[in-house]
Image: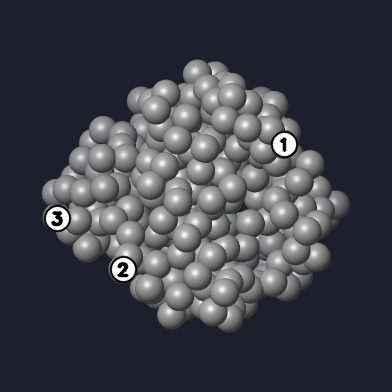
Amino acid sequence: MTQLSPARKPAAQPAGHGTALYGGTRSRRITVRDIAAAKERGEKWPMLTAYDAMTGSVFDDAGIPVLLVGDSMGNCHLGYESTVPVTMDEITLLSAAVVRGTQRALIVADLPFGAYQEGPVQALRSATRLVKEAGVGAVKLEGGERSAHQVELLVSAGIPVMAHIGLTPQSVNAFGGYPVQGRGEEAAQQLLRDAKAVQGAGAFSVVLEAVPAELAAEVTRSLHIPTVGIGAGPDCDAQVLVWTDMAGLTAGRVPRFVKQYLALRELLGGAAKEFADEVVGGSFPAEEHTFH
Ligand code: KIV
C-alpha cells in the first residue's frame, strides 16, 4: 500500500508571487498573519475541507493554503444526516490526521455542536483540546453576535478563530433546512452586525454561507478581516467548498453553489467494478502481481 512519507518533498507550487497564499514559494506553514496580509494585498485564496491525512496531503501538495476539518465530516465522512451529531472526539481524531498529512496549509478545525454553546469557558476547553491534541492552527465556530464572547476569550487565550455566519448548518433544526440567509433589509442588517461583532471580538476571518452575493460583497468591503464565501457570490476574499462536493464524490444532488471539478464517484465506482470483474474472471492477480 502507498504510504504517506514524512519526508515527502513539498510539491512544486504554481508560479506566482513569493508571498502569495496560493502559488507562493513559502515552505513553512501558513499562519493567520499571512491571511491578514493577503487581505491587505487584495489577494483571493481557496479553502477546501479535508477529513484525513491522505486527502489532506493531496490538497497540501496542490497548494491549497487553508484546510478546514469541517463538521461537514458528519454528512461527508461519518454517515450522519447532518453536522449536529459530530463529537469532539471525532473532530479531534480527524484533525490530528489532517495535521499529520500536511506541511504547509493552515489547518482550521470546527468546534462541533454542543462544544461551545454553553459559553466562553466551554469554548476555550474545546478549542484548547483541538490545539493541544490535534495540533490545529485555528478553530472555527458558528454564530455572529451570539458567539462573540466565545471568540473574544479564545483569541485572548492565543487561539485564532474563524467565525461562520449566514447559514450555520448546526442550526438546521431551528432553520428547518438549509435556506439562503440575509434576504430582506432586517436580515441583511443582522448579518452585517454579526460580521462586525466577530471582527470586533478578534476573529481572523469569517465564513459567509448561503447569502446573496450583493450582501456578501458589502460585508467584504466593510470588514478588514477576510470573508470566506460558500454560496456567497464572487466578491468574497476567499472561497471554500466541501471537498467531496467539489470532486463529485457526494451522492445525489449537491447545492447550487457547488461546482464539481471531477466525477470521482463515477471514477472510483468504475475502478471498483473493474477490480471485481478481474477477480471473478481470474485475470487479477496477474504474473506481475505475484510472488514465487
Ligand atoms: O463544515 C464545513 O465544511 C463548513 C464549510 C461548509 C464552511 O463549515
> What kind of residue is marked 2?
Arg
**Is the residue at mark 3 in contact range of ligand 1, meaning its CB lies under 8 Å from it?**
no
Label located before the other in sequence (2 or 3): 3
Image coordinates of residue 285 in percent, x first then y, are 71, 42
Label located before the other in sequence (3 or 1): 3
C-alpha distance separating marks 2 and 3? 24 Å
Give the residue drawn at x 45%, y 39%. Answer: 161
- Binning the other alpha carbons within 10 Å of mark 1 as few (below 14), some (14 to 19) or many (20 upward) gives some
Q: Which residue is mark 2?
A: 221
C-alpha distance separating marks 3 and 1? 41 Å
C-alpha distance separating marks 1 and 2? 32 Å
Quadrant hosting residue 216: bottom left
Q: Secondary structure at mark 2?
A: helix
- Binning the other alpha carbons within 10 Å of mark 2 as few (below 14), some (14 to 19) or many (20 upward) gives some
With 285 as the anchor, is 63 left or right in this view? left
> What kind of residue is marked 1?
Gly
Image coordinates of residue 31 in percent, x first then y, are 31, 37
Determine whether label 2 and label 3 are within 8 Å by CB. Answer: no
Which residue is farthest right? Answer: 280
Q: Which residue is mark 1?
A: 114
* Image quadrant in which the C terminus is located: top right
